[in-house]
Image: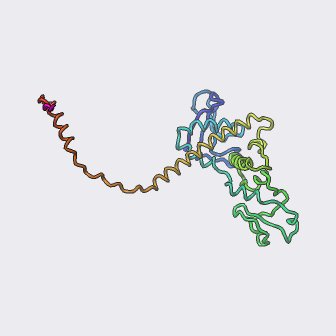
Amino acid sequence: MRTKFASIAKPNEFAYVFDTDAYDSSPQVDSHFRMFATYGDGLCQHSGDWTITTEFMADYLASMATVMLADEELTKRAAYELTRAPSLKDIEFAASVVFKESDRDWSHRRYYSTSERKLTSSRAKQHDKRYEEVSEWNNGTPAAIYRMLIPSYAHGLTMYAYADAIRNWSLNQTKLYMEMPAEFLNWFPGDRDKVQQLRYAFNACLNLARAYQLRCEALNDLQNINPPAVEAPAQVDQPETIGTFSQLAADREVGETEPAIAA
């Protein structure tokens, strides 16, 4: 799938494309998020396309969100990229892994697995690649949670999605504070406006993606409903009065005199 759409911020210079067939080994944001030069010629491509950088991420997402409102196929494909984030259970488990002084002792050392969501002191896990040793930096803070959960070689969109999910969880915790995702990732140092604009643009796309997924779930639920059979209503004979009034109406049409009504 390849969908072009105009830039909101720089419509006379660039346009964007969401291309599911494009691949880049080390994209700054996402391999499918691309841009090209238009030289003011609408969506006509006057250059090759390349992956966007974080500098253009807010404009790309905002521009894509306006298209997602009416393009179901784009929303469906983009949703997969936008919703890559840790689950609430993953975050809560990572927050529960906190270093203790006893972890310094080899005989009491503990190991954790984020994929298994398990914490154990079993020495058998020392060489199990699914497990990591509990270290001093494991302190239950948002930074530690992020470090534990972020996949290896994650690109910018995944990094932002993980930071966003962890921050949303931290807002409900009384003793934890986390900056907005772009600040946490040290993007746009000192430019809070860019940080805020990216947050709005990402949330717009994410909410549209979630709305699409919820709509699909609702349609699936409706398709699984087996309504009870409805019996046909019984035939009811018309009362004699209905027949009398029908005859009177027919008499009027042919000009017959209405029957006299006794005083």
Is residue 143 or residue 231 the one in the foreground?
Answer: 231
The quadrant of the rendering that contains the C terminus is top left
Q: Is residue 26 visible?
A: no
Residue furthest to the left:
256
Q: How many marks?
A: 0
53 w.r.t. 257: above or below: below
Task: Give the colour scheme shown.
Answer: rainbow
Image point 49% across, 53% down: which residue? 221
Residue furthest to the front:
263
Dominant secondary structure of the residues highlighted in magenta in the image: loop
> Percent x, y for residue 65?
60, 38
Image point 62% across, 48% down: which residue? 81
Is residue 148 or residue 157 the one in the foreground?
Answer: 148
> Percent x, y for residue 40?
61, 27
Image point 56% across, 37% down: which residue? 67
> Percent x, y for residue 29?
69, 44
Is residue 226 or residue 38 the one in the foreground?
Answer: 226
Q: Which residues are magenta?
A: 259-263
**Is residue 262 a member of the stretch shown in magenta?**
yes
As drawn, is 240 to the left or to the right of 45? left
Image point 57% across, 32% down: which residue? 43
**Is residue 196 a member of the stretch shown in magenta?**
no
Q: Is residue 161 visible?
A: yes
139 w.r.t. 39: above or below: below
The quarter holding residue 252 reads: top left
